[in-house]
Image (cartoon, rainbow, N blue to C red):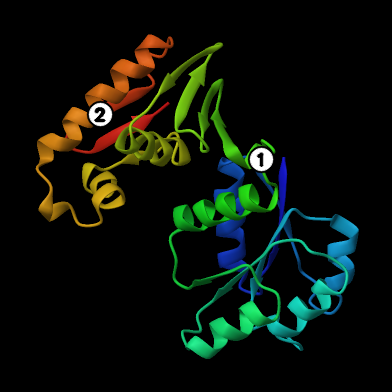
Amino acid sequence: MVKVMIIEDDYKLRTMIADHLGKWNFQSVIVNDFEKIDEKVLEHVPHLILLDINLPTYDGFYWCGKIRQVSNVPIIFISSRTENMDIVMAMNMGGDDFIQKPFSLDVLVAKMNAIYRRTNGNQQGHADIITAGELALNLANGSASYGGDEVELTKNEFHILYLLMGKSGQIVSRDEIMRALWEDEQFIDDNTLTVNMNRLRKKLETIGLSQVIVTKKRQGYLFQ
């Protein structure tokens, strides 16, 4: 399991991030003591670090430099700052990526997966596979597998299943799915989503999953 250290002093935000990462089989380590962050990195040896800039006592730039003295762990800065100089400084201090608040948690996970794959070469890490029960979605090749059988998904089918698995047990509206796929649903014929959803369901049926996506009338879809 990929271990992620969250260095963020906003309790609500760091809890929300940790809860979301848990759905994708990431193990979160939340830092509460902002005085000895470099020691915490050595103690927990995370695979990835999410680092805020505005922290008590010393800022994220300072801690990034301290971490780089003891570890090459990938660091993603998360910050409400929007100045280009902040982004440049984050990269110069040893950061691997920068994401501005407010951000989509799904985009954050995508960035984390991309960085993890890149820093681990061709090794197949757990970040490349997300699971819900026995269903596994491969982020590297866009396939889904269940009970030893595998099926290839199109780009849209993959993104639909990715979104539904990430919100397992929750109703996801058609508008939300269309925004995730095409950014602005007003440009998309509603039938397009129906076609993609039907194709996804048929592919899942071929590997033994016939009722995993449930339609909730006038509400959306539920992954169970």
Spot occupied by residue 32 in the image (x, y as percentages of width and height): 76, 69
Residue 189 position within the rendered picture, expressed as x and y whole percent measured from the top left: 9, 43
Residue 217 in view in this figure: no
Q: Amino acid at mark 2?
A: Met
Which is more toward the observer, 12 or 127?
127
* Amino acid on which disc 1 is placed: Asn
Q: Quadrant of residue 92?
A: bottom right
Compared across the picture, whether 51 is left or right of 110 comes to right
Q: Secondary structure at mark 2?
A: helix
Q: How many marks?
A: 2
Nearest the viewer among 177 and 125 is 125
Residue at point 17%, 31% (across, down): 194
Image quarter of residue 196: top left
Residue pointed to by mark 1: 122
Could you tell me residue 169's position as x and y percent? 43, 34
For marks 1 and 2, give the one nearer the viewer. Answer: 1
Circle 1 crowding by C-alpha within 10 Å: few under 14, some 14–19, many from 20: few
Q: Looking at the image, is 171 positioned above or below residue 210?
A: below
> Left of 161 or right of it: where is 62?
right
Res. 197 mark: 2
Q: Which mark is residue 218?
A: none
Measure how far apart labels 1 and 2 are at the Cα level: 32 Å
Q: Residue furthest front?
A: 122
Residue for point 76% across, 66% down: 31
Image position, residue 147 (x, y; %): 55, 11
